[in-house]
Amino acid sequence: MKYLSASNAMSAASHRRSRFDASDFHLGSVELLLMRLGFALLVFFAIKWEVSGLGAADPKKLTGLTHLINLDWLQSLSPIWLWQTVTILGLVSYVAGIAPALALFPALFFSIGIGTLANSQGAANHSTQLISMILLGQFIAYIWPRRQELGGPPSTWAFPDLAVHQKVVYVSMVIFAASYVVCGWVKLDNSDWKWIQNVPNLSVELQKSNWSEYYDTLTPVPDSLQSVVTMMNEHPNFARVLFGSGLLIELFAFLALMGRRWAFFYGVIIILFHLSVSRLMQLDFWYHMGAALVFLVNLPGLRKTFVGKPDRLML
């Protein structure tokens, strides 16, 4: 009996020490509902509905599904309001928690399909890619319980319980954090671990991207651009410290998975990081900031985050 008691105590202690689990966040039904609502809004506005402005995929610059499927027909998708309505109805059902996997499918299809065709024009854009990845992750996560419980009642799939919704949000957070870690790692790997050393060279890329946009859209180049370029050229070490801190934010994004308070503070840091990038480099990632606000900062759950039981590693 003593052995069993000791074994159970060790097992309980081991469970208490475990990290990176959906149960660390104790998300309530109202929080989850508002998270789904916030994400649904992000999803709808992130879809590139302006399909009439798209051309055919460039055979030399195909991305993703265009290697397997011809998506050129999406550029003549009409009437667009009909497909937007179908997507909205699906998102409403998703927010309500009714058959969420089925409800997310229209948004998932248009998000990936139209986004892939747009990126196969010759100028890939990844400002909304994170939303599509989270959307795909949620779709799979909602389907998975039904695949695990083939003998269970249909309501398991049509009306997921609280634990399933909690798991789906946690999957969303994992995808969010992983995308930043991968982004940081790619910077190091592609630069042969000399990314911080090469930071001053970004001034050339800044001028190239901003002037390229000017010639495409005639949008005036911001006056602040020259100030940033001058700073990077005259104070390279300061630039390395400034942009190097952003690299560290990306590499350690997994810390957001350690609990509610970790998620809140890391969400705020990521939002401030992107706001500074928008100011300095004229590169806007509004959907990334929106996702951080919805899944990490979690405004509806602030009271529970700071008044409830604190995260164990924040003590």
Image (cartoon, rainbow, N blue to C red):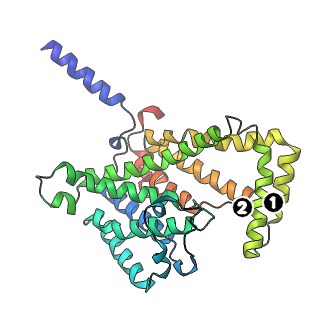
Amino acid type at image mark 1: Leu
Question: Is 171 located above or below residue 218 in the figure?
Answer: above
Q: Which image quarter is the N terminus in? A: top left
Give above or below for 78 relative to 87: below
Is 276 in front, or is 106? 106
- Report the side of 16 relative to 283 (left or right): left
Residue bearing mark 1: 225
The mark that comes first in sequence, 1 or 2, is 1
Q: Is residue 102 above or below residue 205?
A: below
Taking depth in this image into account, of 117 and 256 the one nearest to the observer is 117
Q: Position of residue 7 (x, y in %)?
A: 21, 18
Give the labeled residue for mark 2: 282
Q: Quadrant of residue 277?
A: bottom right
Vertical side of 108 occupied by 198: above or below? above
Percent x, y of residue 89: 34, 76
Q: Furthest-bottom residue in view?
A: 79
Task: Give the distance between the C-alpha atoms of the residues marked 1 and 2, in whole angstroms.
Answer: 8 Å
Assess disc 1: are there few (<14), some (14-19) or many (≥20) residues with their C-alpha within 10 Å of its C-alpha.
Answer: some
Amino acid at the residue labelled 2: Gln
Q: Is residue 215 visible?
A: yes
Q: Residue at x 76, y 41 (%)?
A: 198
Determine the residue positioned at 80% across, 59% down.
207
Q: Quadrant of residue 239?
A: top right
Label drawn at residue 165? none
Q: Where residue 241 sits: x, y (%)?
A: 74, 39
Near mark 2 (Cα within 10 A), the count class, few <14, some 14-19 or many ≥20, is some
Q: Are marks 1 and 2 in contact (CB under 8 Å)?
A: yes
Element type at mark 2: loop
Depth order, front residue of 235/137: 137
